[in-house]
Amino acid sequence: MSVQTEQFKDTLAAYNWKNTNVRMQKQQQQEPMFYYFAYGSCMCPVDLKRSLGEKTHIYVVGAATLPGYRLGFYCYSAFRNCGVLDIIKDPTSSVEGVLYKLPQRLGYALDEREGVHQNWYRHEQVDIACNGKLYNNARTYMVVDKLTEELAPNDWYFNVVLRGAVTCGLPEQYCWNLFNHMHQLQQRHGLKSA
């Protein structure tokens, strides 16, 4: 294959990628959207795609901070067969996560994933700091009936949460703290480490 053919293919691929992004941006401008703050497995766009049925990385606004809350594994997921993340109000803490700007049409599927209709999680409207801006009334989810003590995540959940945190650029120290917290819970509950 000639160098010119390779250059043409590269140019064509870049043009198609650029046109796809422009189409996506126009589509996002035309349909109602909402901000969603993810702090658990939904931080991973690949895992979120599994539930929402379409690529979600295009909706990532960036790494974000939720002040006045802390993380905890105060929920048991029968689907995942382990403890899963929740947020708890705490004026001395903050939670790192990923801010998405999602089409309103995906809201029902997101509620399904979080078990809103089964009363597992509920909507919580929060203010999020992301990329030097404050986003008011973003949606996140909070466990309705919290466990009295934390329950360890299994290896799958452990890995998908960390993958999302690292992929979306959460601060390195926060990722290490999250890793250590999950690792200690697994040790305390006699699970093998991730």
Image: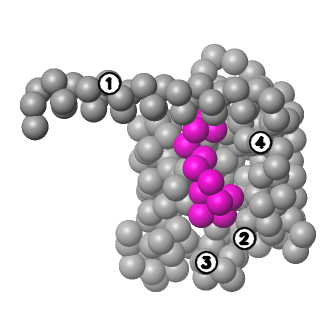
Residue 112's tag is none
Q: Residue at x 61, y 82 (%)?
A: 81
Quick check: 128 left or right of 165? Answer: right
**Mark closest to the chain's N terminus, 3 or 4:** 3
Expressed as whole percent of the image width and height from the top left, the position of residue 145 reads 85, 70
* Front residue of 87 and 2: 2
**Mark closest to the chain's N terminus, 1 or 4:** 1
Which amino acid lies under the numbered mark 1 shown in the image of this protein? Thr
Which mark is in front, 3 or 4?
A: 4
Q: Which residue is mark 2?
A: 75
What is the CA distance from the residue labelled 1 to the residue labelled 3? 44 Å
What is the CA distance from the residue labelled 3 to the residue labelled 4? 26 Å
Q: Which residue is mark 4?
A: 103
User: Image quarter for residue 183?
Assistant: bottom left
- Label 2: how many Cα within 10 Å (few below 14, some 14–19, many 20+): many
- Label 4: how many Cα within 10 Å (few below 14, some 14–19, many 20+): some
Q: Which residue is mark 3?
A: 80
- Label 3: how many Cα within 10 Å (few below 14, some 14–19, many 20+): few
User: Which residue range is magenta in the image?
Assistant: 49-63
Q: Is residue 93 magenta?
A: no
Instruction: Examine the rendered structure and indicate whether residue 33 appears above or below residue 182.
Output: above
Which amino acid lies under the numbered mark 2 shown in the image of this protein? Cys
SS at mark 4 in the image: strand
**Mark closest to the chain's N terminus, 2 or 3:** 2
Which amino acid lies under the numbered mark 4 shown in the image of this protein? Pro
Q: Do the residues bearing badges 1 and 4 touch, measured as CB atoms within 8 Å? A: no
Quick check: 39 left or right of 166? Answer: right
Q: Residue at x 58, y 50 (%)?
A: 55
**Mark closest to the chain's N terminus, 2 or 1:** 1
